[in-house]
Image (tube, rainbow, N blue to C red):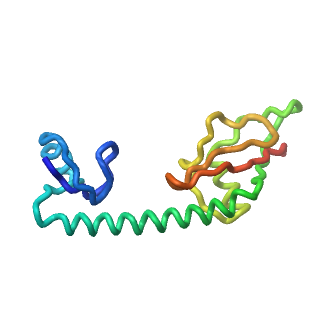
Amino acid sequence: MRVVLRSDVPGVGKRGDIVAVADGFARNSLIPNGRAITASEGIAEQAASMRRSRDLRDAKDRESAQTIASKLVPMVISITAKAGKEGKLFGSVTPADIVAAVEAQSGAVIDRHTLAAHEPIKEIGEHAVGVRLHPEVTFELRLEVVPA
């Protein structure tokens, strides 16, 4: 069955795309939940309008992400934490701590889910944390953890 997606559906497509899905998936999940409408002959204009608005929103999001990235790339964000004599932290630096420090020191607001911290930060010193603000905008955020 051919449907027009009204919202992004992971693994299927994005808003405004005309896709072919299994009849049962369309009838039992997509259409009742308002995530798609049945594709008819006159629906092509509406789908094109959805795609245009999606593209404009995506371009705006990419531009704002690039602005934030250009502001944060040259900076070194400093975070103070309690540490022992050997440089081990009492606890760890969490993504929420990193987001709060970025906002306080640069004024840029980022979401903690955009951080790609593979392991918790448990030592003083310099660390690099990956940030993915947009699928096309990724960069390394440099952190300096100093003892309190």
Find residue 111 and report its image quarter. bottom right
- Residue at screen point 75% across, 58% down: 74
Q: Along the line of sight, which residue is nearer the eye, 73 or 125?
A: 73
Q: Along the line of sight, which residue is nearer the eye, 99 or 36?
A: 36
From what the image shows, is residue 127 above or below residue 45? above
Side (left or right) of 11 relative to 144? left
The quarter in which the C terminus is drawn is top right
Q: Residue 34: image x %, image y %?
A: 21, 55
Find residue 85 and report its image quarter. top right
- Name the residue at the top extreme: 86
- Residue at screen point 81% across, 39% down: 124
Find residue 63 and report its image quarter. bottom right
Q: Residue 134: image x %, image y %?
A: 51, 55
Q: Residue 108: image x %, image y %?
A: 64, 63
Side (left or right) of 59 relative to 123? left
- Residue at screen point 12% across, 42% down: 23
The mark tally for this picture is 0
Side (left or right) of 125 relative to 116? right
- Name the residue at the right extreme: 85
Q: Residue 48: image x %, image y %?
A: 26, 66
Side (left or right) of 122 relative to 51? right
